Image (tube, grey):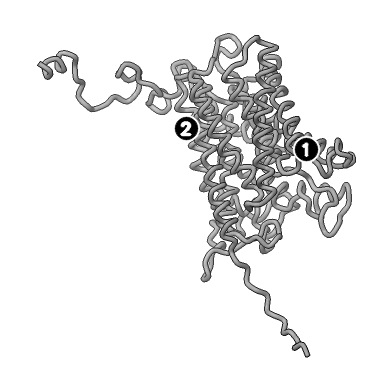
Amino acid sequence: MTPALTPLAAAAPQINEAATAFMLIASSMVLLMTPGLALFYGGMTRSKSVLNMMMMSFGALAVVGIVYVLWGYSMSFGNLQDGGGDIAGIFANPFHLFGLSQLTGPDGPRLVDPFGVGVFIPEYIYAGFQLTFAVITVALISGAIADRVKFGTWIVFSIIWVTIVYFPIAHMVWGGGLLSNSAGGLSAALFGVTDGKATVAPIDFAGGTVVHINAGAAGLALALVVGKRLGFAKVAMRPHNLPLVMIGAGLLWFGWFGFNAGSELAADGVASSVWLNTTVATCAAAIGWLVVEKLRDGHATSLGAASGVVAGLVAITPACGALSPVGSIILGVVAGGLSALAVGLKYRFGYDDSLDVVGVHLVAGLWGTVGAGLLATSTGLLYGGGWEQTVLQVLIAAISLVLSFVLTCVIAVALKATLGWRVSEDAESEGIDQAVHAESGYELGGFPASGSRTSTRPVVTASQVEGANA
């Protein structure tokens, strides 16, 4: 006779060490993207403002990292595990997990299973991973206003913008809010609910709406409010150091594997397909950009190659978990071509997007988000999935764009009226590096540039060297 089995008490969740290690590595890779962006943007500016451009990325990293721990994670994901409250599906309670002290207890850091599939990781590393996304999003915006703004105003803007714009959009898309697959979201209202979730789930695997459309729309708003650089469209403003641009693009490409594959939160089959899709889309986008350059200008440039790489990475970000490798190639080559054409729009319409945040991040982000609705293997329109997914992708892209643009305009106008955005014309003409930071990016011939801090070390003359050798 078989003995009756006694029901066991529910086992405490156990940490998945492989997934945790994977997330530690992915988070570190995404963090590296911000210094990589500093190199990419720094090389694209003129030499007299390279340090200021890089400082805008490092400044964003410094302040957003702190803000995210204090209230950013709580606003974005505070209701992830224990129902911390949700304000109209727009953002979570900013005070519920303020400071993140609640993420640890007598038994150590608490565990979280974000996707509900039984893979538990410490919530600390989940928060850390999301922190790096907030940082890079703010840093991306800075390229639209290079060469002309006050560093202090940029820092204040970073804190306000990430709080009012980024955290709510992150919550709406990833935290169970209005643009997610939750039963109370937009998709559920339009297309119904199945098993407690929206029947048609929005596709944004790693941040097409949250990061790239968001940053691109904000960059456009800032460029319009802040105004043009002195001499825009009249004086050549070429990148001063293309090797820096290429190095920065390479670091961004490397870090982007953490960005995309890391968003799976586990080293599994989906993460593997995401890695491959990210690679081939980026390769295709570089080719697409270079082909457009060659046909239009007669030259395929290193700047075009680096920019095409970034455009491909941007476009595949929302779609990387839903496409096939062939679909990723199609998405990428279109992204590269579209962005190569879009960067010239600033001259046609007269807005000074200094480093093409709009042309690359907004345009490629829009295409990647909408393209996911066309090319997704399970629900895409071109795969016989019906029109619902594509319509939903257009809606979430448009809502993210409008929200970011309008809110950024409000913040930018308020700061313009209080702190002011522009440095003086003299500072802009002579270079922000010396005027604002009292430094120079380059000291050629051993002599510091005018206005930079001088060394206290004694100067050794040629005659002294000859005397010592005699």
- Residue found 56% across the figure and 12% down from its top: 231
Q: Secondary structure at mark 1?
A: helix
Quarter the N terminus occupies: bottom right
Q: For the residue marked with disc 2, what is the amino acid?
A: Met
**Label 1, on which residue?**
372
Relative vertical location of residue 363 with respect to residue 274 in this rendering, above or below: above
Rendered location of residue 319, percent (x, y): 73, 39
Q: Nearer the viewer, residue 459 or 21?
A: 21
Q: CA distance from mark 1 to mark 2?
A: 35 Å
Q: Nearer the viewer, residue 8 or 450?
A: 8
Relative vertical location of residue 138 with respect to residue 233 in this rendering, above or below: below
Quarter the C terminus occupies: top left
- Residue found 58% across the figure and 53% down from its top: 127
Q: Secondary structure at mark 2?
A: helix
Instruction: For residue 77, say whether it is visible.
Output: yes
Q: Are marks 1 and 2 in contact (CB under 8 Å)?
A: no
Using the rendered view, name the quadrant where residue 238 is placed.
top right
Relative vertical location of residue 96 with respect to residue 287 in this rendering, above or below: below
**First reached walking from the N terminus: tag 1 or tag 2:** 2
Q: Nearer the viewer, residue 397 or 307?
A: 307
**Label 2, on which residue?**
55
Q: Residue furthest front?
A: 1
User: So how many labels did they put on this image?
Assistant: 2
Using the rendered view, name the quadrant where residue 325 is placed.
top right
Q: For the residue marked with disc 1, what is the amino acid?
A: Ala
Rendered location of residue 277, percent (x, y): 69, 38
Q: Nearer the viewer, residue 407 or 313?
A: 313
Rendered location of residue 84, percent (x, y): 67, 61
Number of residues whose C-alpha sits closer than 10 Å to that of mark 2, classed few (under 14), some (14–19) or many (20 or more): many
Instruction: For residue 221, say whether it is visible.
Output: no
Number of residues whose C-alpha sits closer than 10 Å to that of mark 1, classed few (under 14), some (14–19) or many (20 or more): many
